[in-house]
Image: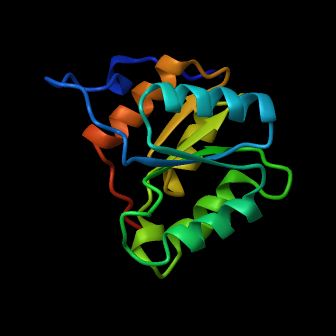
Amino acid sequence: MQVDMQSSEHQPPKHHKPYDLSEFRVLVIEDSPFISNLMSSALNEMGVGKVFVSPSVSDAKDKILSYNAVVSSQNIDVIVLDWLMPDSMGIDFLNWTRAHKSDSIKFLPIIVCSAFASAELVAESRDHGANEAMVKPVSAQKLANRILYVIDKPRPFIPTP
């Protein structure tokens, strides 16, 4: 079953003036150079100040540990995570992030991105701490909607049994 990720629930809230995202930092974890370039370009067009790209989960963890070890203006603000990575699955990355001892890592907003977004995958990613989900192919508008939704309506991650 496919999930309609364009429902009104996932549209960005209306706000009065545009955001200044020049200090915003996004990490894209994506093994496809084409998709990562597409997302990077879209984020840069949105005015995002710094876009990092990791072609593997291990590289992403290194970047996160480097930039988010302590709270600072250099912290990564949002992660866009491809669910199927060659060296690890999205669920493993979510579990690592949400179990981290540092709050600046544990509570990072994560947007899961997958070409195979079923209701089960969306529920599983949510249950393991994803803030949002979106389906590939990714348009600049879909990506902008998810980023704005994370900013305007943050969903805190709360561990439960």
Q: Position of residue 77 (x, y in %)?
A: 42, 54
Q: Position of residue 92 (x, y in %)?
A: 69, 62
Horizontal relation, residue 84 to residue 155: left or right: right
Q: Position of residue 26 (x, y in %)?
A: 51, 47
Indicate how the structure is coloured in the image: rainbow
* Image point (42%, 78%), residue name: 70
Residue 4 appears anywhere in the view: no
Residue 87 vs 26, above or below: the answer is below
- Quadrant assignment for the N terminus: top right
Residue 51 appears anywhere in the view: yes
Q: Position of residue 109 (x, y in %)?
A: 44, 52
Which is nearer the eye, 41 or 6?
41
Which is nearer the eye, 128 or 101?
101
* Image point (55%, 30%), residue name: 134
Picture mark count: 0
In the rendered image, the residue lying farthest to the right is 86
* Image point (37%, 70%), residue name: 72
In the rendered image, the residue lying farthest to the left is 16
Residue 138 vs 31, above or below: the answer is above
Residue 36 vs 161, above or below: the answer is above
Horizontal relation, residue 110 to residue 116: left or right: left
Which is nearer the eye, 18 or 6?
18
Residue 107 vs 52, above or below: the answer is below
Horizontal relation, residue 71 to residue 132: left or right: left
Question: Residue 74 occupies which quadrant of the picture?
Answer: bottom left
In the rendered image, the residue lying farthest to the bottom is 101
* Image point (48%, 25%), residue name: 45
